[in-house]
């Protein structure tokens, strides 16, 4: 439903449950950024106790479902951003990235990588250019006689 800009007019008709709009009444949506909110909700565990939109049996399945979902969301050019639901399990909802006690269901590094995805070539180029500018700035503005973070430690060969 969110794959192309051709779908935008469809998104703003009153075809949603209860006839609700996806925008605030009285606010124009043409040309405005679109943010996907309140999506995701993967529950984890074999037990039927607790709620989620979908269910993973174990951490490996959870990571796979989460990574696939976020790959799809990041690939949608229509979206300016997203907000996953939800951060941690609460009461009957077992669909957080963390358990209710804030223990991660999968390692935080894997959550971050799946959320962020692999950097695009342009991001790598920007990062390299920024690093180069920062090195040049540090060289140009170094205080004489003070060590630079990239200098070898005193006494090093």
Image (cartoon, grey):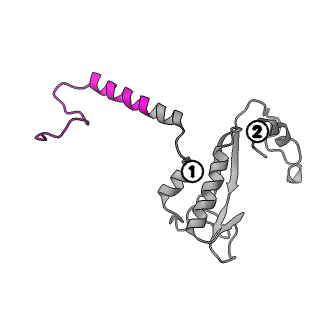
> In this view, which residue lies farthest toward the front?
121
Residue picked out by circle 1: 115
Looking at the picture, how far across and down is residue 83, in whole percent? Answer: 64, 49
Q: As displayed, is residue 152 above or below residue 140?
A: below
Looking at the picture, how far across and down is residue 64, in whole percent? Answer: 60, 60
Q: Is residue 73 magenta?
A: no
Q: As displayed, is residue 120 above or below residue 110?
A: above
Q: As displayed, is residue 52 above or below residue 120?
A: below
Residue at 89%, 49% in the rendered image: 19
- Identify the element where label 1 is drawn: helix
| For residue 105, side relative to residue 141 (left or right) | right
Mark sitting on residue 11: none
> In this view, which residue lies farthest toward the left?
155
Residue at 55%, 63% in the rendered image: 98
Label 1 environment density (alpha carbons within 10 Å; few <14, some 14–19, many ≥20): some
> Which residues fall within the magenta stretch?
128-157
* Contact flag, marks 2 and 1 (Cβ < 8 Å): no
Label 2 environment density (alpha carbons within 10 Å; few <14, some 14–19, many ≥20): few
Residue at 54%, 38% in the rendered image: 120
Quarter residue 90 falls in: bottom right
Looking at the picture, how far across and down is residue 115, in whole percent? Answer: 57, 50
| Any part of residue 60 in sight | yes
Q: Quadrant of the C terminus?
A: top left
Q: Is residue 148 magenta?
A: yes
**In the image, which is nearer the foreground, mark 2 or mark 1?**
2
Looking at the picture, how far across and down is residue 137, in whole percent? Answer: 33, 25
| For residue 3, side relative to residue 80 (left or right) | right
Residue at 62%, 73% in the rendered image: 45
| Any part of residue 141 in sight | no
Residue picked out by circle 2: 4
């Amino acid at each position: 439903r969110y794959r192309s800009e051709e779908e935008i007019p469809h998104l703003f008709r009153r075809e949603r449950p209860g006839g609700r709009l996806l925008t605030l009444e009285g606010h124009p949506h043409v040309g405005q950024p679109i943010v996907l909110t309140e999506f995701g909700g993967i529950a984890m565990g074999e037990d039927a106790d607790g709620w989620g939109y979908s269910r993973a049996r174990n951490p490996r399945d959870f990571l796979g479902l989460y990574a696939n979902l976020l790959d799809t969301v990041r690939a949608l050019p229509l979206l300016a951003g997203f907000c996953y639901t939800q951060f941690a399990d609460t009461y009957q909802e077992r669909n957080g990235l963390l358990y209710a006690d804030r223990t991660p269901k999968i390692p935080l590094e894997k959550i971050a990588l799946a959320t962020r995805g692999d950097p695009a070539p342009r991001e790598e180029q920007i990062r390299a250019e920024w690093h180069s500018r920062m090195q040049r700035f540090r060289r140009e503005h170094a205080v004489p006689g003070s060590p630079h973070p990239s200098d070898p430690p005193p006494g090093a060969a």
